[in-house]
Each structure stands twice: as structure tokens, then as C-alpha cells.
Image: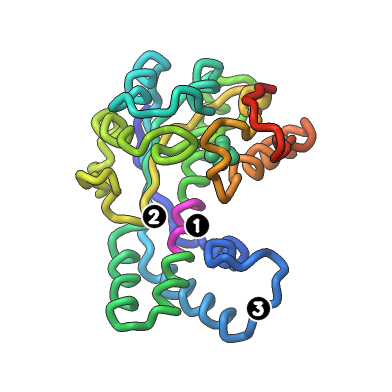
């Protein structure tokens, strides 16, 4: 299976909550009317110029092992290395919200409208995440329809540049997936063009395989701890309870 997934801007409309979180505004914080108007303006611009597209291609564990190895610069112990062997199915993915969004962000910054440029940047980043969510759901639904996975299987995604998977892993990922097909290219720095894009692996399997403790050596540098929320969402959707977080005082790696 290798498919281009056309997505409408309406399907990935970024929420105020997600966009504000990327601005460093915590959920429930009191926000001025000006900031809310700024978000509404940025969201309107985004919806008018976003061109969300996704690409997904399944990959065997043997082939993924080679892609994941990349340039040999990954941390020795990572969630991906721990989980992918236990998966039912794997797929590589890439998504973008298009070049025009990036061009508009640049326009606002060049015109010194930093507030709108910054808010549009956050809205676009939230839109990229929603586009990746959409591709994740598409892949899971396709597998469920084909009967290729267990009935309770869930999917979680990981990207080069995060959680111990070195950003140079983009090179082999691009060689295998060829996201140029949907207009995404890779710079020598491993950044994607358009910048508002994402890529990585979708790991599908039973709810238990997606559970790990945030106690890898690099987790101490992690500001978002985003895996906790993602695992928590998966556990809630599968009815397996809440997620446990490694106490700050306990740094030793421990598997659940
Ligand atoms: S705590 Fe951060 S770095 Fe560690 S696994 Fe979770 S998201 Fe990745």
C-alpha cells in the first residue's frame, strides 16, 4: 500500500487550544480579546491558503530496521527501537499543509507584523499535527477494513528529530518514501521544504505495545513530554486506564 491522501482544510482546522499551546498559553489561562481576534484572523488566513496532503506507505519490519538505522546516529535506547518489533503493521508517512502557508508566514514577518506571523506559524504547526492525525486515522481504518490487524490495535507515530531518533534519519526515510511525490523535499540540513511538514513512522499494534515510561536519558531534556498525553489518549480510547509518568527523582530506565 502506498497512497496519496487528499485532505481538505476543513478536516484539519486547527483549534484555538492547540494553537495557543504552541504560543505558550496554557489551557484555561485568561486571554485578551486582542489575542483571540489574532487567532481568528490567523485561522482564517490558514484555512484560505492551506493545501493539506499526506502520503503513507507500508513497510516491513526488516526494511524499517534499515530506514531507522539511518546514518547510525540514533540514541542506543529509544521508544521506536523498543516498540516497532512488537507492531502488527508499520508505515512511513509524510504530510504537509503546503508552501503557500509558509510563504504567508514569511510575508508577515518581512512586513514586521510579528504578532500575526507568529500566530499564523502556530496555527500552521497545529494544522500539520491535525494532518498527521488524519493520515494516522486513515491508515488504521484501512488496516481494520482489510482485517490485517487485531480488533483492538491502535496507532502511534514517531518522527526523526524526536525521542532519540536522530534527525539525520530523514535521509533514508525520504529515500524509501519519496515524499517529493507530494511536494516535500529535504534540505541538506534535514529540514523539510515546505517547513510546515512532518514525516515519520506509524506503528500499529495492541494498546500494550504503545506503553513506555518517559525515563530514557534524553527525556530529562524534553520540555513537552508529549508522549504522556498521546499514550494517555490511546489508553483512554482502548479503556486501559491512565498513563504513568516516571517520577522526576527516578532517572533509571524502566520498562512497563
Ligand atoms: S518524554 Fe519527551 S523525549 Fe521522552 S519519550 Fe516522551 S516525548 Fe519523547
Reply above or below: 37 against 247: below
**Residue sitting at 36 percent across and 59 percent down?**
51
Give me the C-alpha separation between circle 3 and circle 1. 24 Å
Distance from disc 1 to disc 2, alpha carbons, whole Å, reads: 8 Å
**Ligand 1 falls in quadrant:** top right
User: Which element type, helix, strand or loop, lies under badge 3?
Assistant: loop
**Rendered view: 253 above or below 219:** above
| Image location (x, y in percent) of residue 199 | 38, 41
Q: Which residue is labeled 1 in the image? A: 12
Mark 2 Cα-neighbour bin, 10 Å: few <14, some 14–19, many ≥20 = many
Q: Are marks 1 and 2 in contact (CB under 8 Å)?
A: yes
Look at the numbered disc 2 and say if its residue's Cβ is closer than 8 Å to ligand 1. Answer: no
Residue 201 is marked as none
Residue named by callout 3: 31
The location of residue 137, given as percent across then percent down, is 54, 40
User: Quadrant of residue 28 in the image?
Assistant: bottom right
Q: Which residue is mark 2?
A: 52
Amino acid at each position: 500500500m502506498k497512497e496519496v491522501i487528499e485532505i481538505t482544510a476543513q478536516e484539519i482546522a486547527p483549534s484555538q487550544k492547540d494553537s495557543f499551546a504552541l504560543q505558550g498559553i496554557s489551557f484555561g489561562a485568561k486571554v485578551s480579546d486582542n489575542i483571540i481576534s489574532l487567532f481568528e484572523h490567523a485561522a482564517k488566513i490558514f484555512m484560505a491558503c492551506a493545501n493539506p496532503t499526506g502520503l503513507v506507505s507500508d513497510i516491513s519490519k526488516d526494511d524499517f530496521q534499515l530506514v531507522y538505522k539511518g546514518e547510525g546516529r540514533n540514541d542506543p535506547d529509544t521508544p521506536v527501537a523498543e516498540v516497532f518489533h512488537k507492531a502488527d503493521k508499520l508505515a512511513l508517512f509524510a504530510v504537509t499543509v503546503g508552501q503557500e502557508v509558509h510563504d504567508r508566514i514569511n510575508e508577515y514577518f518581512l512586513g514586521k507584523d510579528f504578532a500575526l506571523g507568529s500566530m499564523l506559524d502556530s496555527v500552521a504547526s497545529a494544522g500539520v499535527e491535525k494532518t498527521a492525525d488524519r493520515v494516522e486515522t486513515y491508515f488504521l481504518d484501512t488496516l481494520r477494513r482489510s482485517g490485517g490487524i487485531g480488533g483492538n490495535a491502535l496507532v502511534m507515530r514517531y518522527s526523526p528529530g524526536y525521542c532519540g531518533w536522530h534527525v539525520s534519519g530523514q535521509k533514508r526515510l525520504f529515500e524509501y518514501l519519496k515524499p517529493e511525490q507530494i511536494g516535500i523535499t529535504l534540505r541538506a540540513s534535514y529540514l523539510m521544504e515546505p517547513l510546515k511538514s512532518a514525516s515519520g513512522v506509524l506503528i500499529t499494534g495492541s494498546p500494550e505495545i504503545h506503553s513506555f515510561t518517559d525515563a530514557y536519558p534524553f527525556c530529562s531534556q524534553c520540555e513537552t513530554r508529549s508522549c504522556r498525553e498521546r499514550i494517555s489518549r490511546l489508553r483512554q480510547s482502548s479503556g486501559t486506564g491512565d498513563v504513568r509518568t516516571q517520577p522526576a527523582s527516578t532517572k533509571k530506565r524502566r520498562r512497563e
